[in-house]
Each structure stands twice: as structure tokens, then as C-alpha cells.
Image (cartoon, grey):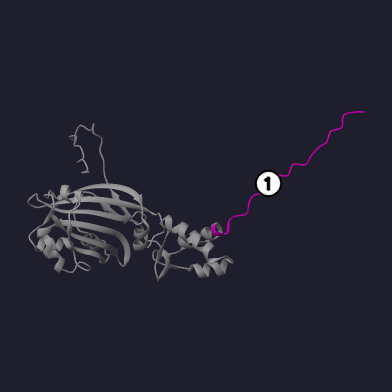
Amino acid sequence: MGEVKVWSRVSMPKPSPEARYQEIERWLRRRVLRSSLGDPLPSEKELAAQFGVSRMTARQAVQNLAAEGLVQRRRGAGTFVAPRPIHRHEGSLMSFTEDMRRRGLKASSRLLEAGLRPATTADLEALRLPDGARVVAISRLRLADGMPLAIEHAALPAECAGVLANDLETGSLHDSLVAAGREPAVSRSWIRARIATAAEARLLEIPPRSALLVERRIIDDSEGRPLEHTETAYNAANYAIDAVFSSSNAASQPYSAAPEAPA
């Protein structure tokens, strides 16, 4: 008998259908492109009804776009087309309040902590204080036109305790320091990125584990005395720090090493 060949049909896998949250994402992206900054977007409940999915599925789509900085979720208000990131240029020292004012935005703060406490090791080094010293600790949620932008933890020498009597929610800390005879003059900064803690994400109204841009800053006054040691965590989707670098081989520019960050 001759050889019999048996052909088996190989079934090719069918492409998996698009996940429903991806469909909602694509629709939202098109909606964002047609909208203006700050325009409201449908709520998770409305999206769930429109696409016939659960609110959890709709929420996943919104969270993915929020993580990309395309939309902004405001607790108790809804979802909006996100504003473009705020860019801060190097070279000029100004307070958050003044910076926002120059951009046509209204700066405000939510006071999280204000009072005297023992200085941390980092505070002692940054402010050149003796062991056992106390500092003025001021923690605030910084807002621009009501939008949470950053969480700021500032430490000042104890002799600056008079600023605690001033309005730290609608006023400027730097203005208070100038009024007390301590004018901020020179700042050194170190910037890094990290993931937001659960508490930080809640305060900034961003998805869990979002990226933060964290700036540690030491400010000296006009007489060269340490005045302020601050760590500020910015929502990386809404804030950028611009810097200009030149080649160390440029003949017209002398080489200058960046200051080393304190431990």
C-alpha cells in the first residue's frame, strides 16, 4: 500500500478582543484632544453607563490617563482635562507664591503642620545647628488655582518662630521672613524622582504610585546664614524644572562642579 499522508488542520489563535478599558481610554484620548484645558470629562459612573461596563473598568481607564498626565481627578469635583505642566526655570530664587503670581495663578496652601520640634540630623547639617537644637517646622500642601501641586516640608532656625503667627495658608513664608529681617538670597537644590506614598497620593489627588519630582533645597539669607531647609514633593505630571548645561570643555566657560548634596 502506498504511503498515506494525513493533514491536520492547525487552528490559528484569534486575536483577543480589545479590553473594554482600552476602548474607553481611546475614546477619552480623542475627547481630550478636542477639549480645552480644564474642561470637565464624564464621570466614572457616566462612562460605565455609556460603555456598558462596571465602574471599576471605567476607573481603570481614567487612572491610566491620569498617570500619563492627560486628565486630572479632583476629589469631590470630577475629572478634567489636565493643564500643561508648570515649568520652573533655573537661575532665579522666588517663593512659590511669587512664582504662581507671575504665571497668573492664585497660590494658596493647606497647613498640615506648624510648630517647634527637635531638629533632624539633616536639619542640623543643613542649617548648621548644634546638637539638640529645635527648628520651626512648617508642612503645607501647595495649591495653584485650587489644584494640589506639591507637598512642602520646611525647617527654619528656632529664632524664626515669629513666622508662625502669620497667615501661612494664603500668605508667603518668604515675605514673612523678609519682614522679620531675614531675606532669602541664595539657594542650592538637589532633585530626584521617586514614587508617591499612599498618603502623598491622597493629598495630591493623584493615582497611587504616581511619580513625584522631589527637590531638597537649602537657602541662605543675604548675610550668608542658613535660613531654610526644605523638601518639596511635586506631582511630576504637572511640574517640571528646566536646566541648561554646557560642556565642561567649552573654552569660554570655566568648569564649575555642582555642590555636593549633604547626607
Residue name at image x 8 percent, y 62 percent: 180
For label 1, the crowd category at 10 Å Cα-Cα, with few meaning under 14, some 14 to 19 and many 20 or more, is few
Q: Position of residue 188 (x, y in %)?
A: 19, 47
Q: How many marks?
A: 1
Q: Nearer the viewer, residue 162 or 40?
A: 162
Screen quadrant of the N terminus: top right
Of residues 183 and 106, the one drawn nearer to the viewer in this rendering = 183
* Residue 154 included in the magenta stretch of the image: no
Q: Is residue 222 left or right of residue 17?
A: left
| Left or right of residue 64, residue 254 in this image | left
Q: Height in image: 145 above or below 185?
A: below
Identify the main secondary structure in magenta. Answer: loop
In the foreground, 240 or 214? 214
Identity of the residue drawn at 47% across and 61% down: 62
Q: What residue did someone put label 1 on?
A: 13
Q: Is residue 115 above or below residue 231?
A: below
The image quarter containing residue 3 is top right
x, y (%) of residue 92?
Answer: 19, 52
Judged from the image, the secondary structure of the residue bearing numbered disc 1 is loop
Q: Residue at x 56, y 59 (%)?
A: 23
Residue 4: give x, y in percent of width and height: 87, 32
Boundaries of the magenta span: 1-21
